[in-house]
Image (spheres, rainbow, N blue to C red):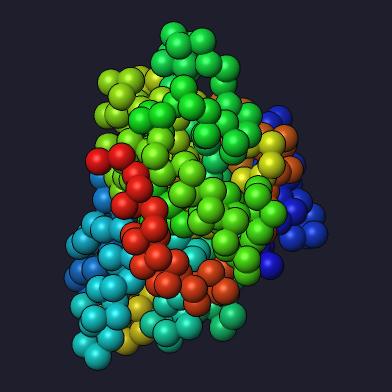
Amino acid sequence: MNRFSCVRVAAGGMSERLAGRPLRRLAAAAVAGVVFAAGASSSSAAEDVVNVAGWGGPLQKLFIDTIGPELKKQTGASIVYTPGKSTETLAKVIAQQSNPTIDVAIATEIIGLKGDKLNLWASLDARSVPNLKDVYDYARMPDDKGVLWSANMIGIIYNPVALQKHGIKPPTSWNDLFDPRLKGKVILGAIGTDFGLQTLLMLAKVNGGNEKNIEPGFAAMKKLAASVLSFEREYTRVGELFDAQTAWIGVWSHAGAAQLAQRGVPIQFVAPKEGVVLTANYVGVVANAPHPKAAQAFVNLLLSEPVLKAFAEKYGAIPMNRNVKLPEEIQKKLPDQAAMSRVVSFDWRHVNENRDAWTERFGKEIETVARP
């Protein structure tokens, strides 16, 4: 069961309920005078680096800028960052399993759970990660092998300028992707990305299937493939295509759309009426990591109020620390109550068990039909 099947976020005050658990109201007042909680013992000073693998681009900069100075102050360690997609990060950790060089892995929940099944993560130490006690219960993994630190919504993105110019109404449904006037103007995430996988899952669900009956999803994707301009892996590429009005519509995250909009790209996000996916972001300390104390300190800082507030402000990420208080102007960047009421659930462990087979099939049956 997806942990986010019952999430509701109100635009004014962000009152929430997640997986049946009442959550604390996030006040509209700004966080003032918040300090970072110490994340490691003094013995961690001997660890002069922490090797982190996660997403690149602006996110990489945000991780380094918001965590790096305080981590250096607390532990003496500097961040050495390796950018890559979640699947790439997982592949690196697997390849290094006998002799790890990566200390901390940042990925999507789907990939984090896959890593857990492969026994890739060490348990977090509550003494070294005191902020762990402040995250929502559903965000904690069994034996604290990793933790969810934020979440994003996956839905439809569109170019309001291009649609208006061609007399097309803003989308409200997943079926709007199939509008013949949008042929060659649709962009989707590559199947190797969670965006691509989640599009397949949602098209299955909209057409009467689910993750355990994926056939309706493949049938729908075959119909849609002829309209697809490209299957993308980089959000920066999405911005380029939307900015040039080469792409008019697609599937991406609310956070990615919010960041591109801040840069002046004509892009808007909508939660389709049939439902949306809420996908969490995962962080884990690699088992037998070379710098375990600095790694635990990094995770503690990532879970802290100032860092999560910064990710909410700059990237629209939904914070998993119940104590984070967001001012109204930041809350507006997050999905509202109406959008959150449309969140649907999937069995991500079942998805992981079938993902490789679906990816192989997608390449043969879908990508060969898509526009060159």
Residue at the (21%, 78%) spot, across then down = 101
Vertical order, 288 against 194 (above or below):
below
Residue 120 visible (yes or no): yes
Q: Quadrant of residue 256?
A: top left
| Numbered marks: total | 0
Q: x and y percent of residue 52 in the render?
A: 28, 65
Q: From the viewer's perspective, is 360 left or right of 138?
A: left
Residue 32 visible (yes or no): no
**276 or 315, which lies in front?**
276
Vertical order, 206 against 13 (above or below):
below
Q: x and y percent of residue 62 in the render?
A: 33, 45
Instruction: State the quadrant of the N terminus.
Output: bottom right
Residue at the (61%, 42%) spot, across then down = 325
Q: x and y percent of residue 290 in the render?
A: 25, 82
Q: Quadrant of residue 211?
A: bottom right
Q: x and y percent of residue 14 in the render?
A: 69, 39
Residue extending farthest to the bottom is 98
Residue at the (28%, 21%) spot, across then down = 244
Residue at the (49%, 44%) spot, across then down = 223
Instruction: State the quadrant of the C terminus.
Output: top left
Q: Quadrant of residue 265?
A: top left
**143 or 229, which lies in front?**
229
Q: From the viewer's perspective, is 195 left or right of 350?
A: left
